[in-house]
Image (cartoon, rainbow, N blue to C red):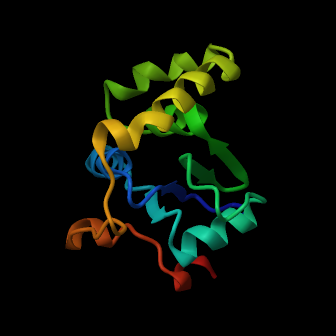
Amino acid sequence: MAGDPRAILLFDGVCNVCERTVRFVAPRDRHGRFQFASLQSPVGSDLLRRAGLPPEQLDTVVLIEGERVSLRSTAILRVLRRLRFPWPLLYPLILLPRALRDRAYDAFAARRYRWFGKKDACLVPDAELAARFLEGSDLR
């Protein structure tokens, strides 16, 4: 992953909020640098292992930028920083203590299925979005 300019966003593929997040990020990614994979996919599991995370870690969003791996609120804020205006204006929230940010993230994540529901299967992207999803061959 060293020197790789891509940013890979791993998300819970059955979570409605996570799917909406991917559908929000993709059109606002002005440089097309984000690629996506669900945590449940073979690619997602492989990337988690490479990042030193347990492949069964399905309760958080993971952002991989080269060698940097960000989780929870840090991942979300780093994503927002790369999007079109006005979303980068939220990045200064990174200055809040991570423990505080992650506590809020975890509280929301614990209730996301109850509030927004979940799917029986992972997100199936439309043709345009599918081009941004990683497959096993993309990792070599």
Q: On the picture, is 112 further left or further right than 40? A: left
Query: Who is closer to the viewer here, 65 or 58?
Result: 58
In the rendered image, residue 86, in percent from the top left (x then y), is placed at 31, 24
In the rendered image of this protein, does residue 117 appear above or below residue 47? above
In the rendered image of this protein, does residue 41 appear above or below residue 72? below
Q: Residue furthest top?
A: 96
The image quadrant that residue 98 belongs to is top right
Q: On the picture, is 80 further left or further right than 116? A: right
Q: Residue furthest bottom?
A: 137
Q: Residue furthest right?
A: 52
In the rendered image of this protein, does residue 40 appear above or below residue 111? below
The image quadrant that residue 122 belongs to is bottom left
Q: Residue sitting at 31 percent across and 28 percent down?
A: 85
Q: Quadrant of the N terminus?
A: bottom right
Q: Residue sitting at 72 percent across and 60 percent down?
A: 54
In the rendered image, residue 120, in percent from the top left (x then y), is placed at 33, 66
> How many numbered circles does the render carry?
0
The image quadrant that residue 57 belongs to is bottom right
